[in-house]
Image: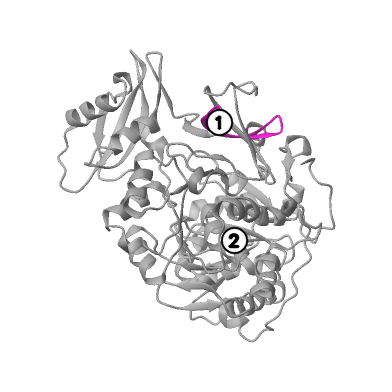
Amino acid sequence: MTDAPPQQHTSAHVDTFARDHLPPPELWPDLVFDLPELRYPQQLNCGAELLDRTVERFGPDRPAFRTGDGEVWTYGELLRRVDRIAHLLSGELGVRPGNRVLLRGPTTPWLAACWLAVMKAGAVAVTVLAQARAQELATICSIARVTHALCDARTMDDLVKAEAPGLRVTPFGGEGPDDLLRRGSGLPETYEAVATAADDVALIAFTSGTTGRPKGCMHFHRDVLAIADTFALHVLRPTPDDVFAGSPPLGFTFGLGGLVIFPLRAGASSLLLEQAGPRQLLPAIAEHGVSVLFTAPTAYRALLDGTDGRALSSLRRCVSAGENLPAATWRAWHEATGIRIINGIGATELLHIFISAADDAIRPGTTGVPVPGWQARVIDAAGSEVPDGDPGLLAVRGPVGCRYLADERQATYVRGGWNVTGDTYVREPDGYFRYVARADDMIISAGYNIAGPEVEDALLRHPDVAETAVVGRPDDERGQIAVAYVVLREGARRDPDALRAFVKAELVPYKCPREIVFLDALPRTATGKLQRFRLRSAGDLE
């Protein structure tokens, strides 16, 4: 069934800023609640559902969070610590339901505990990356009218430099008398969660902001549970004995879902690593018996370079998102480990993954099919559905929809009741969705359409290529030409002619890059996402 934008339930928000700045109802996407598990009660607090209800189901003694140095928090210990922080928030710190609370720090159990406490206190979490700089923080605080911040004591400097007006900052994990953990140590160990409405705003997740002003994506308490009750429940299918780990930070919705929401919803545990690159992940997987891994395609390739596969034997589920998963990477991983990577596409606007497939349903080279609870189609610029096999814009709808915080770009993302993600896709006749390119990444050269990811996949099949990105560069004669930026494996010789000949043997000649530029590393954001705009706009990255 579909649902119009819901009417006001009994909101617990005293500070109504977030609800007041939702898009007008006519700019909301259609919402779909066609699974029984998505029919949530009108009053719902996702923090209590993820923690208190999970303790009731599985008991307090199971492990919840683990650290790289061997520390283990049980669910009972996590609940007590979260409730003390919630008492401090709603008491001495003066946080009122609906206030925005910025959370900043590396990925640790304490950061996750702070997020859960903000949920239980009925406030709105604004998670940011530990690497965010002062100007970025100032912009986010201004857009979201952030009133309070909980910040790892080791990452305070840039937040102080941001000089956000009226921001009350409380450090945690430090030695000072004002430290959150010190101030909360004597408070009660039980806290009754604020009775928020299911459609009270729970978090504001900002897009990476690699181009233009960042967009704040507002998500409700029910949305937090919906991503667990669609993708996690039906595709990932976790068990209480699973150990989750991954590279995305909690300031990134891919990481918040994969490392906090999904394991807690299932009663499983999560290994939270402050440093989670391939060099740290590889030994951690073996040492801690990680069974569910969330990371990006580049990391999967790097992990393979560091092992023969035996160190990865504890894994049973591997999820890739953030950028397109090349078929060559999927096949190399499967050959080395026997594990089928679960590919997926998600968006900050929709909180997590909405197209994917698992196990025997996986088809290398495609993203998959709509996750149960979600619908997808491929449309043209006018919003009409295109025939199967033809490229067009990906449009999706489900239980979570795009709701930008006071941003005119809402009308661009939501069209005719559908969320239009900005990705070019093809729907195959049997219902599988195949990624072509970002809508602005399609290279049109002398009348030919060249999809950068297809050329990247061919280059990655060359044994000397570690990473690559293919973009279009303006050209007076051809309109655009395809340029490949390539990172070689250590010791490999920079020979563009050899790579060009290899690609010509893999693809039709017009898809071969006209130029090949060698780099030591591709430009990426703090979350590891490739910054294609830098490659398109700069020719001096070598």
Residue type indicated by callout 2 = Ile
Point out the frontmost of discs 2 and 1: 1
Residue at x 51%, y 51% (from the top left corner): 136
SS state under label 2:
helix
Residue range of the region highlighted in magenta in the rendering:
413-431
Q: Which badge, 2 or 1, comes first in the chain's sequence? A: 2
Q: Most prominent secondary structure in the magenta stretch?
A: strand
Of 175 and 469, which appears nearest the observer? 469
Q: Is residue 156 left or right of residue 397?
A: left
Q: CA distance from mark 2 to mark 1?
A: 32 Å
User: Would you call the spot at circle 2 few (<14 residues within 10 Å), some (14-19), or many (20 or more)?
Assistant: many
Q: Is residue 172 left or right of residue 48?
A: left
Q: Position of residue 256 (x, y in %)?
A: 55, 58
Q: Position of residue 266 (x, y in %)?
A: 60, 64
Q: Is residue 314 above or below residue 175?
A: above
Residue 294: mark? none
Q: Is residue 324 above or below residue 179?
A: above
Q: Position of residue 462 (x, y in %)?
A: 24, 37
Of 162 and 170, which appears nearest the observer? 170
Task: Report the residue marked by disc 2.
Answer: 261
Q: Quadrant of residue 310?
A: bottom left
Q: Quadrant of the N terminus?
A: top right
Residue 430: mark? 1
Of 285 and 513, which appears nearest the observer? 285
Q: Is residue 59 left or right of residue 288?
A: right
- Whether residue 343 is visible to the viewer of this picture, yes or no, is no
Q: Is residue 484 above or below residue 136?
A: above
User: What's the coloring here?
Assistant: one colour
Residue at x 65%, y 61% (from the top left corner): 147
Residue type indicated by callout 1 = Asp
> Marks 1 and 2: in contact by CB < 8 Å?
no
